[in-house]
Amino acid sequence: MIDNSSDHQPLTAMSDGGGRTRALVIHPWRKSRHGKSMADDRVRSPQARLEEAVGLTAAIDIDVVEQAVVPLSSLRPATLLGTGKLEELRILIESREIDLAVVDADLTPVQQRNLEKAWKTKVIDRTGLILEIFGERAATKEGELQVELAHLNYQKSRLVRSWTHLERQRGGFGFIGGPGETQIEADRRMISERITAIRRQLETVTRTRQLHRSRRQKAPYPVVALVGYTNAGKSTLFNRLTQSKVLAADMLFATLDPTMRAIDLVTGRKVILSDTVGFISELPTHLIAAFRATLEEVTSADLIVHVRDAAHPDTEAQKADVLSVLADLGVKPGEEGAPPMIEAMNKIDLLSEAEQEAMFNRADRDIDMVAISAISGDGIPALMERIDAIVGAQDSIHHIVLEHGKGPVFLGCIAMRMCWNNAWTMRGQHICTCGWTPLPTQNFSK
């Protein structure tokens, strides 16, 4: 049976000597016959992909003692790597006393098992690593449930290997060897039952979130959602705009659970700013599905601000990854019915003076782009003005006359930053100009 108790050891607790887990990180780089890289490596260099994998591993305090790009002429179904490279890495793992091998690729259950047998150490793939990070980052009940759901879906297809309770492991998610067919079927059934239970709990959480969302809509404050590749600086920007202290660290996936704050724009209009989980290349489909309830804050937003790392060499590839995840969520900026989106080109403080000037010139020519530094504050006023203009453009303008005694209605409009040009007539009537979103327009028309 599946054990959900404390048998599970995190990857950070795998070292036999009680210190930090020592890891080898490799990025398999498959070349075409013409020497060009394939798949995602066509837009990212293999070295950049390796550096990202190292960053992911370091994000959970694992000591990366060795890292390498491993060129492949072909993919081996059983082991992914050829026999020569397998032996070379086995010697390295043994000599460097490595506890964990991270393969920056999606491994089949058979490949993962065979690599562990060949190297005599724990092996995880890219998806397993991301799940491990998400498990450490989840700070709310909803986040924990979403991570567990994604993890169980991941494991359900990998039951060629046993769970931790079948044999005590050094760490990770604890699978090795292979149970009998009956045990596999029993584990699969128990996983399915747990998945069903989690989905029921998430449905309750989702209803609560929808209730909160409907209350916000009645407020009615527009929602501005920050999205972006992980470590692009969303939380740093969120903190600057809201004067709050959300965790903003130089690490991948520093933010997992969504955070929302109300802020006042240049004109005094109030909006709700939402910070969301960072996206990443090759984000597993089942992980997106598990976090769909959380990411619905993006799909229902009035404006999306795509925070980009302007100083990153793969910023265009990261943009493509973010747009791909948004498309998976049903959000395709530019299409009818989709929320508008602007790009905040962040971290310009890391660019040279010439690069900064070029970035500002580029932003001047593109109405949907603003060059900023969330650290120094450069460009933040321009970003706020742009957000204000876009949100304001969605308002419908009304000139209204409130009879004497309608003070509560007027005070409500003022509280929601919807009225200006206020004046009183000799008869005690109040005349004002109001900018309303569609929902309050419906409410007041009643």
Image: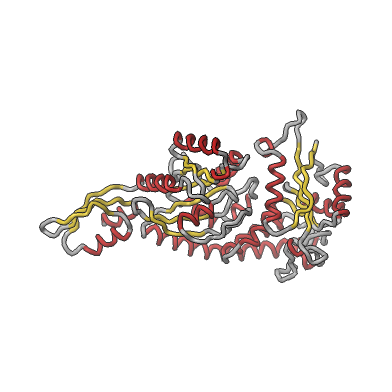
In the image: residue 160, left or right of residue 223? right
Q: Measured from the top left, where is residue 182 in percent x and y?
A: 79, 63
User: Does residue 52 sit above or below 363 in this rendering?
Assistant: below
Outermost residue toward the left in this view: 426
Residue 211's quadrant in the figure? bottom left
Q: Residue at 60% across / 50% down in the picture?
A: 231
Outermost residue toward the front in this view: 353
User: Does residue 200 sit above or below 266 in this rendering?
Assistant: below
In the image: residue 432, left or right of residue 281? left
Question: What quarter of the picture does the C terminus occupy?
Answer: bottom left
Q: Residue at 44% across / 62% down in the picture?
A: 212
Q: Measured from the top left, where is residue 140 in percent x and y?
A: 57, 65
Total marks shown come to 0
Q: Residue at 30% across / 54% down in the picture?
A: 418
Outermost residue toward the top in this view: 34
In front: 284, or 202?
284
Residue 352 can be seen in this image: yes
In front: 365, or 150?
365
